[in-house]
Amino acid sequence: MKEAAMELLDRYLQAVRKYLPTRRQDDIIAELRANMESQIEDRESGLGRSLTQGEMEDLLRKMGSPVIVASRYQPQQYLIGPALFPLYIYVLRVAVLWALIVYSIVILVVLPLTVPDHYDIVASLLRTPGVLINVAAWVTLVFVAFEFFAARYPEKCPSLAGLTDKWNPSSLPPLEKVDLSGRKPRSFTLAVAEVVIGYLLIAWLLLIPSHPFLLMGPGVVVLQIAPYQLAPVWWTFYWWIVGLNALQVVWKTIDLASGRWQQPAPIRQIIFKAVGVIPIALLLSVRDHIYVVLKNPSTDQLRYGQNLDVINNSVRLGFSVICAIVVVQLAWDIGKIVWDAYRRGEAPR
């Protein structure tokens, strides 16, 4: 019974740690543990016995939810509270990453087909930071608005774990396994968010063929009247991307359902990055590097043939750079896994 009560204390402190400033986590947790163990000893001395699990839950409930306790140690007021902040960071990263991917595709493929002036393409490249900042601003505004309404109208918003008066210490997550590599386990909220966003991404990808506006925006109108069109190889590339994302989200769903979401195997990321090189390699191996063709080659070859060569060479160069980046990242990740395995082998037993 004593062990069950102390395990509950460890789970409580573990939950508090997640919302504390990174640099002060160890000091704050040590202080909290000392104070709470002192309270437990005083309570047990008065009762003449060890606390039961129910009595420990009552003590923790009086202390407050982990979010509330951690908020007392925050250095300043916040627009996005500690309960939402981990989810906000994850969504922000995903949104910025996909904004960069989509904008890069537009610059590499759509703009060369619709904008003959290379200065306009360079100007579009220089606008990339502004586009990413705009995406980040919208994501931030959404989370700030949700934080505002959740704090002022909690009865009208979905409850956030740990913020309601109905918080129950028994609902604390189990103790996490120690990762010798030093990586922090993901939270359940982030694991669920990854799965949900993954399915939304697949739905978006599947809608692109019938609604190209979702990818190209207003540029789709210009593309329809342009003398160029995409080569058939892009369909192969497209279905590879859909398949890879579907495989990844199914894998994450299985991890979530089986309880392996806290520490996904690092080899999984290696596999996906390695397989992700395949569609890029398919593009780079296309015969004569033909990615864009003329709609009416018999009549437009003399007029647009030179521009067509420039477009295809630009696409090839762009994806060569992308392939190089992916390969370097893959080599770096493999090196990290080998180094972590070496450290575990050298660690004292």
Image (tube, helix red, strand yellow):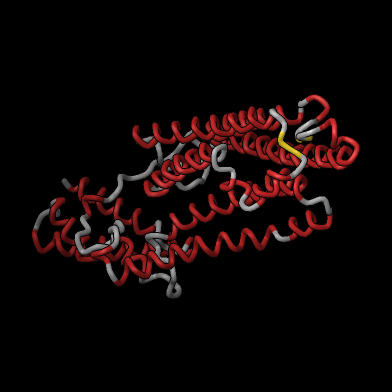
| Residue occupying image coordinates x 13% and y 56% | 55
| Residue occupying image coordinates x 41% and y 44% | 196
Quick check: 226 left or right of 3? Answer: right
| Residue occupying image coordinates x 28% and y 58% | 159
Quick check: 232 left or right of 349? Answer: right
Residue 33 pos. (x, y %): 32, 60
Residue 50 pos. (x, y %): 14, 53
Q: Is residue 148 above or below residue 129?
A: below
Residue 219 pos. (x, y %): 67, 50
User: Can the viewer see residue 210?
Assistant: yes
Tell which residue pokes out farthest to the top in this image.
287
- Along the line of sight, the residue nearer the viewer: 195 or 28: 195
User: Can the viewer see residue 267?
Assistant: no
- Along the line of sight, the residue nearer the viewer: 349 or 164: 164
Residue 7 pos. (x, y %): 26, 48
Quick check: 321 left or right of 298? Answer: left
Q: Is residue 177 above or below residue 277?
A: below
Instruction: Answer with the quarter of the image where residue 343 lies.
Output: top right
| Residue occupying image coordinates x 30% and y 72% | 152
